[in-house]
Image (spheres, rainbow, N blue to C red):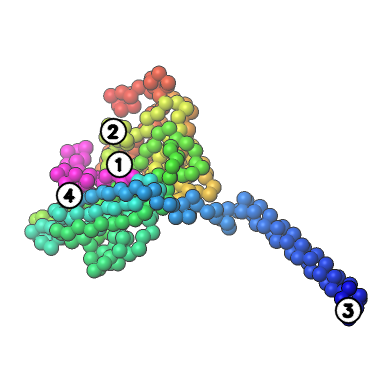
């Protein structure tokens, strides 16, 4: 015992220390309790506490660099009644016509990506528009700084990639998911004319899933949805080529053709990328991208689908649907297990969009073909195609 310190003071000090310890422990209990409550709320009301997405921490670079070059070319869109309408869009083949949609850009999370827009032959540079419009690449959903964002109003110099010039857009792929790219120069005109394509970021180091922790798929499809007002295309061609036309008023947009990957029914059945074809029991992922100007109401016959992602992010709470509205620029990642053999419609339920200029069936319509293990199908293809 130290000299001069009275025993009652030591007892008092000890009591204070014990009291502080008790208060501290109670505080810890209260905090733990509060956390429990929050966790319970988070489970029942996910809106209040969104979970961190897979890609929230910037993906470590894979060390891979992916280089792409896109050119702009014109083309003609042929319709079933024998008409053809001028269009222009991106291509990775400088010797070929525009590809509509543009070439899919598919990279892995963590890749360093360079996309060069080489505007060597601008199809908008015509005798009636001698300067040409120029073009850009807006990487929709990637949240990039202005110099990489492809908006001519905020780009370096305040203009697009002018005829005869090139520009490289650069990013490191961070969040796995479904995105798209499009021109932002005179966007109402240029996107409608065909300047759009899919951009997909695959999760790092994981095969056959759209996101970390979502169900494995056996097959994967990307359906780029779009719509076309053929009269606007004709007006645009006239304005750029005959000099006698006037620019379309885009508020008068009234689409009469509707596409999946640039195809309308029945051409959606010609290319295996444009219709689902699987064996009974398989699981398929479909990435839906609306690059058009109107809402599409996508419906699957035969199977509900699980919505696992949207707009380049995994959903905290996946949900089942058989019909989903997809607005302009939206993306949904849907997955379905095909548990019965047969053929089933996959189509826009705004039924006027299942036509080619009013003729049913047509437009935004394709099929899910689920075959028996021996490859047979209870619904003959010939019957389905009206043969
Ligand atoms: Cu453009």
Q: Earlier in the sequence, mark 3 or mark 4?
A: 3
Dots 1 and 2: beta carbons under 8 Å? yes
Mark 4 → mark 1, Cα distance in angstroms: 18 Å
- For residue 112, say whether it is visible: yes
Numbered label attached to residue 135: none
Q: Earlier in the sequence, mark 4 or mark 1?
A: 4
For mark 3, what is the residue? 3
Dots 3 and 1: beta carbons under 8 Å? no
* Magenta-colored stretch includes residue 93: yes
Local crowd at mark 1 within 10 Å, few (<14), some, or many (≥20)?
A: many
Q: Give the label, 3 or 1, closer to the camera.
A: 3
Magenta segment, which residues?
77-106
Dots 4 and 2: beta carbons under 8 Å? no
Task: State which quadrant residue 381 falls in.
Answer: top left
Per the image, label 4 sits on a secondary structure element best described as: strand
User: Is the CB of the residue bearing disc 1 within 8 angstroms of ligand 1?
Assistant: no
For mark 1, what is the residue? 261
Local crowd at mark 2 within 10 Å, few (<14), some, or many (≥20)?
A: few
Q: Is 252 above or below relative to 65?
A: below
Q: Is 239 above or below relative to 256?
A: below
Residue beneath the point at 40% across and 18% down: 374
Q: Nearer the viewer, residue 270 or 220?
A: 220
* Magenta-colored stretch includes residue 292: no
Where residue 227 sits in the image (x, y, percent)?
Answer: 29, 47
Where residue 165 sits in the image (x, y, percent)?
Answer: 17, 59
Q: Give the label, 3 or 4, closer to the camera.
A: 3
Where residue 197 sits in the image (x, y, percent)?
Answer: 29, 48
Dots 4 and 1: beta carbons under 8 Å? no
Q: Is 8 above or below relative to 350?
A: below
Q: Earlier in the sequence, mark 2 or mark 3?
A: 3
Q: Earlier in the sequence, mark 1 or mark 2?
A: 1
């Amino acid at each position: 015992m130290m000299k001069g310190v009275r025993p009652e003071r030591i007892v008092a000090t000890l009591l204070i220390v014990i009291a502080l310890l008790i208060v501290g422990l109670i505080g810890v209990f209260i905090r733990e309790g509060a956390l429990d409550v929050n966790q319970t709320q988070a489970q029942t009301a996910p809106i209040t506490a969104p979970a961190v997405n897979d890609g929230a921490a910037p993906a470590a670079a894979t060390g891979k660099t992916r280089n792409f070059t896109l050119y702009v070319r014109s083309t003609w869109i042929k319709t079933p009644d024998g008409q053809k309408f001028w269009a222009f869009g991106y291509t990775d083949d400088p010797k070929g016509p525009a590809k509509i949609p543009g070439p899919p850009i598919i990279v892995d999370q963590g890749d360093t990506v360079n996309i060069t827009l080489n505007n060597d032959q601008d199809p908008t540079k015509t005798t009636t528009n001698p300067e040409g419009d120029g073009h850009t690449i807006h990487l929709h959903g990637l949240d990039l700084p202005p110099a990489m964002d492809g908006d001519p109003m905020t780009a370096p110099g305040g203009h697009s990639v002018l005829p005869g010039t090139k520009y490289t857009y650069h990013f490191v792929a961070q969040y796995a998911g479904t995105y798209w790219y499009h021109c932002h120069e005179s966007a109402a005109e240029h996107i409608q004319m065909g300047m759009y394509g899919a951009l997909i970021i695959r999760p790092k180091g994981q095969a056959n899933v759209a996101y970390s922790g979502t169900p494995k798929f056996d097959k994967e499809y990307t359906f780029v949805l779009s719509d076309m007002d053929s009269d606007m295309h004709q007006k645009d061609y006239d304005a750029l080529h005959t000099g006698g036309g006037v620019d379309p008023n885009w508020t008068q947009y009234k689409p009469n053709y509707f596409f999946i990957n640039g195809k309308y029914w029945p051409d959606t059945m010609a290319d295996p990328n444009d219709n689902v074809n699987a064996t009974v029991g398989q699981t398929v992922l479909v990435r839906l991208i609306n690059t058009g100007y109107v809402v599409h109401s996508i419906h699957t016959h035969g199977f509900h689908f699980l919505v696992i992602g949207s707009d380049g992010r995994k959903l905290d709470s996946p949900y089942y649907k058989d019909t989903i509205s997809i607005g302009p620029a939206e993306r949904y990642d849907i997955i379905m297990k095909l548990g019965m053999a047969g053929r089933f419609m996959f189509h826009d339920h705004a039924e006027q969009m299942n036509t080619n200029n009013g003729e049913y069936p047509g437009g935004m319509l394709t099929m899910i073909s689920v075959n028996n293990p021996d490859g047979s199908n209870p619904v003959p293809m010939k019957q389905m195609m009206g043969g």
